[in-house]
């Protein structure tokens, strides 16, 4: 009984979230009306303007290297930091070598 | 106990490592046309290195791995990435000036020499990811703390 109630409550919350997140009649922040949809949901813009603005037919590469280039810089930095950290952690200590 | 695996694995690795490398290079160079890109292609080429390490053993891999070369390659990739991003700095960081002004790599969309700085950036990121992953794998393999 309790489990069924819990599952029903989860479903209820999920349904409310789905309604809230729907772009047509959901909760809106900031701009109102059509503007909100254009600025919040940018995927259609990328699909329509990606080829003429950036030139690549692979829209994901257009986004990753042009529209969201800073994110890619961060990714490269994270990769570098991870490798530097792995090498610094795993490197044998000087004491171990001397023994 | 010998470090490398058997004859069958080594022969298969000899046959497949060049093919994996070519496939990774294809993914990197066609990153702006087909699914994939610098990260994915670089990881694929690094997978060939991992196969080499597993099939032939650590000592054989260490002979072919030079710390300074891979360090320089990774630095080159990162600096190329940043430098290309700064090309269009008069307008904005990450402004695709090569494509919008038609300076270089400005062919028809869908051809290999198109999309402005995207192919160069894909190459740079692929180089960086390849060198970084190979360095990480070699470091993890060679600095292990247990004895056989």
Image (cartoon, coloured by chain):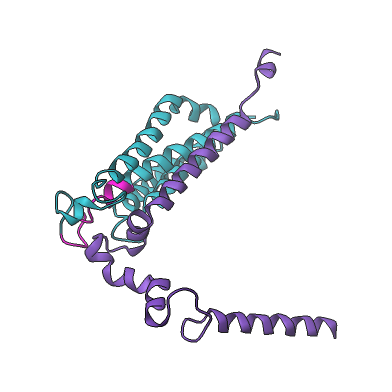
Colour cyan belongs to chain: B
Q: Is residue B4 visible?
A: no
Residue B85 rendering spot, x and y as whole percentages: 30, 45
* Residue displayed at 68% across by 83% down: A11
* Residue displayed at 38% across by 70% down: A42
* Residue displayed at 69% across by 19% down: A96
Residue B30 rendering spot, x and y as whole percentages: 29, 54
- Apparent side of residue B115 relative to residue A98 in the rendered image (left or right): left
- Apparent side of residue A13 relative to residue A67 in the rendered image (left or right): right
Q: Chain A's colour?
A: purple
How many badges with numbers are in the image? 0
- Apparent side of residue B80 relative to residue A94 in the rendered image (left or right): left
Residue B22 rendering spot, x and y as whole percentages: 34, 47
Quarter of the image where one finds residue A36:
bottom left
* Residue displayed at 65% across by 17% down: A94
Is residue B113 inside the magenta stretch? Answer: yes
Q: Is residue B61 visible?
A: yes
Q: Nearer the viewer, residue B57 or B99?
A: B99
Q: Nearer the viewer, residue A58 or A73?
A: A73
Is residue B119 inside the magenta stretch? Answer: yes
Magenta residues, start to end: B108-122
């Amino acid at each position: 009984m309790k489990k069924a109630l819990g599952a029903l409550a989860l479903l209820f919350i999920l349904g409310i979230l789905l309604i809230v997140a729907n772009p047509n009649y959901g909760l809106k922040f900031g701009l109102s009306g059509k503007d909100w949809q254009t600025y919040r949901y940018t995927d259609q813009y990328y699909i329509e303007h990606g080829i003429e603005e950036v030139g690549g037919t692979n829209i994901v590469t257009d986004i990753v290297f042009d529209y969201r280039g800073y994110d890619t810089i961060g990714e490269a930095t994270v990769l570098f930091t991870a490798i530097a950290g792995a090498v610094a952690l795993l490197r044998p200590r000087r004491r171990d070598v001397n023994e | 106990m010998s470090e490398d695996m058997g004859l069958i694995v080594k022969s298969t690795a000899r046959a497949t490592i060049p093919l994996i490398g070519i496939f990774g290079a294809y993914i990197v160079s066609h990153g702006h046309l087909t699914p994939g890109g610098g990260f994915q292609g670089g990881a694929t080429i690094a997978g060939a290195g991992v196969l080499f390490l597993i099939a032939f053993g650590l000592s054989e891999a260490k002979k072919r791995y030079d710390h300074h070369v891979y360090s320089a390659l990774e630095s080159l990739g990162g600096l190329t990435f940043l430098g290309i991003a700064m090309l269009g700095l008069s307008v904005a960081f990450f402004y695709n000036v090569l494509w919008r002004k038609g300076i270089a790599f400005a062919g028809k969309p869908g051809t290999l020499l198109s999309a402005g700085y995207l192919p160069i950036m894909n190459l740079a990121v692929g180089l960086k990811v390849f060198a970084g992953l190979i360095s990480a794998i070699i470091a993890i393999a060679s600095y292990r703390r247990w004895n056989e």
